[in-house]
Image (tube, grey):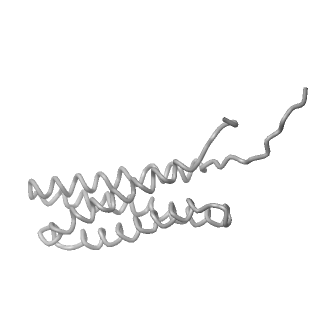
Amino acid sequence: MAAIFDRTRLRAIHPFHAVLLAGAAPLFLGALLADCAYRSSHQIQWSNFASWLIVGAMVLCGIVLVCAIAGLFRAGRRSRGGWLYFLLVLATFVLGFINALVHGQDAWAIMPEAVVLSSITTLLACAATWLGFSGYRVGGAS
C-alpha cells in the first residue's frame, strides 16, 4: 500500500496577529455604543469613553495594518484575498483616524458625524476581522 504525502501548506494566522485583529472590532463597537449613549443622554463622559475606545482601537488597528503588510510580502502574488484584507484594514485605519479627529472636538460639535463615522468604522472593522479569519485554516488536511 502506497502512502500519499500532500505538500500543500496550510496558512495559519499568527497568534499575535489574531489577538490584535480580534481586539480592534470590539473596541470600535464600544465606541459606537458610547456615541449612541451620548446621543441619547448628552452626558459628556460618554464622548470621553468613545474617544478612549477609539484610541485603543487605533493602536490595535495600526499594528494589524503592519501585520497585513507583512502578510502581503509573505504570501507573494498568489493571494488576491490578502490584498482585499489589506485594503479593508487600511480603510478601517483611515476612517478610524478621521473618527478620532472628529472626537477630538468639543462634545457638542461631534454629534452628527460621530455616530455615522463610528458605524462605518465598526462595519469595516467587522468585515476586516471576518475576512482576516476566513482565509486561514489551522489543522490537518480535510
71 w.r.t. 18: above or below? below
Q: Nearer the viewer, residue 14 or 78?
A: 78
45 w.r.t. 96: above or below? above
- Image quadrant assignment for residue 39: bottom left
- Image quadrant assignment for residue 81: bottom right
Can I make out residue 108 in this image? yes
Q: In which quadrant is the N terminus drawn?
A: top right
In the rendered structure, the answer to whether residue 140 lies left or right of residue 24 reads right
In the rendered structure, the answer to whether residue 19 lies left or right of residue 25 reads right
Q: Nearer the viewer, residue 97 or 140?
A: 140
Q: Residue at x 43, y 62 (%)?
A: 59
In the rendered structure, the answer to whether residue 141 lies left or right of residue 117 reads right
Residue 96 at what x, y percent from top left? 35, 66
Can I make out residue 67 in this image? no
Q: In which quadrant is the C terminus drawn?
A: top right
In the rendered structure, the answer to whether residue 72 lies left or right of residue 126 reads right
Residue 122 at what x, y percent from top left? 33, 57
Q: Residue at x 45, y 52 (%)?
A: 129
Residue 72 at what x, y percent from top left? 61, 65
Hey, which residue is sitting farthest front in the picture?
A: 1
- Image quadrant assignment for residue 70: bottom right
Q: Nearer the viewer, residue 34 or 81?
A: 81
Q: Residue at x 51, y 64 (%)?
A: 65
